Image (spheres, helix red, strand yellow):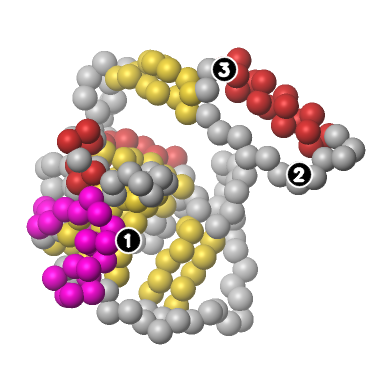
Amino acid sequence: MNREPPFALCGPTRTLIADGVSRRYCDVGAAQAALRSNQAPIVLGALPFDLSSPAALLTPRAVDVTHGLPDWPTGPLPPVRVAAALPPPGDYRDRVRRARDQLAAADNPLRKVVLARALELAADAPMDARAVLRRLVAADPAAYGYLVDLSAAGDGYAGVALVGASPELLVARSGDRVECRPFAGRPRGPPIRMPTPPTAPRWPPRPRTGTSISW
């Protein structure tokens, strides 16, 4: 494949890659209806954290499942610079100090505080999302990497791709087996080996599968 795919999801053992797009959905209900009516054999894409925002879902023309990423470009990426920090560094440090003080207080009802910040980067030239994904997966082969074309979410997302990698497997289903491996605060390092329970919860199988990522 000499072009960026509309969707790719890779794990430690398998990679799913979409080829072409037969239909796009910005509405989750429309995608669900297409699955239930057998108009779509599969729906792939990304879901927003804000449910009032449009989704970026699609039904591909074809799907290829392999044991690893294709031989995608791995050349140098263009230089990037930090265009914005959200929140600004000073504000973020204040939040960290406030969280630290609250956790140390004798009457503190909190047991955990989750803080996050974002860096907005600007590149000197267009970036190949496939090269970014390959680098992320190479840095942590045990992670789950993804590449999603967000064009289905509307004109504001035309040509925009969501690329990332996470060590967390929120939920996966294979037949009547459901697997969940959520966790937080994992430092980068060797893969965490999860104990295999003697029995796993089972649900009746469903005829159609939807794969999604929150963004």
Q: Pinpoint residue 84: horizontal percent, then vertical percent.
A: 43, 17
**Residue beneath the point at 32% across and 54% down:** 9
* Label 2 element class: loop
- Count of number-bearing discs: 3
- Which stretch did the figure color magenta? 17-39
- Residue 109 falls left or right of residue 153: right
Q: Which residue in the rendered view is the most extreme toward the front?
A: 52
Tell me, for residue 110, which label it has, or none.
Answer: 2
Q: Nearer the viewer, residue 12 or 107?
A: 107
Q: Amino acid at mark 2?
A: Leu
Circle 1 packing at 10 Å, graded few (<14), some (14-19), many (20+), is some
Closer to viewer: mark 3 or mark 2: 2
Mark 3–mark 2 Cα distance, whole angstroms, equals: 24 Å
Q: Which residue is mark 1?
A: 211
Categorize mark 2 by other alpha carbons within 10 Å: few (<14), some (14-19), many (20+): few
**Is 41 positioned to the left or the right of 46 in the image?**
left
Q: Position of residue 94 (x, y in %)?
A: 67, 20
**Residue extending farthest right:** 106
Q: Is residue 37 magenta?
A: yes
Q: Position of residue 196 (x, y in %)?
A: 59, 72
* Kind of residue sitting beneath label 1: Thr
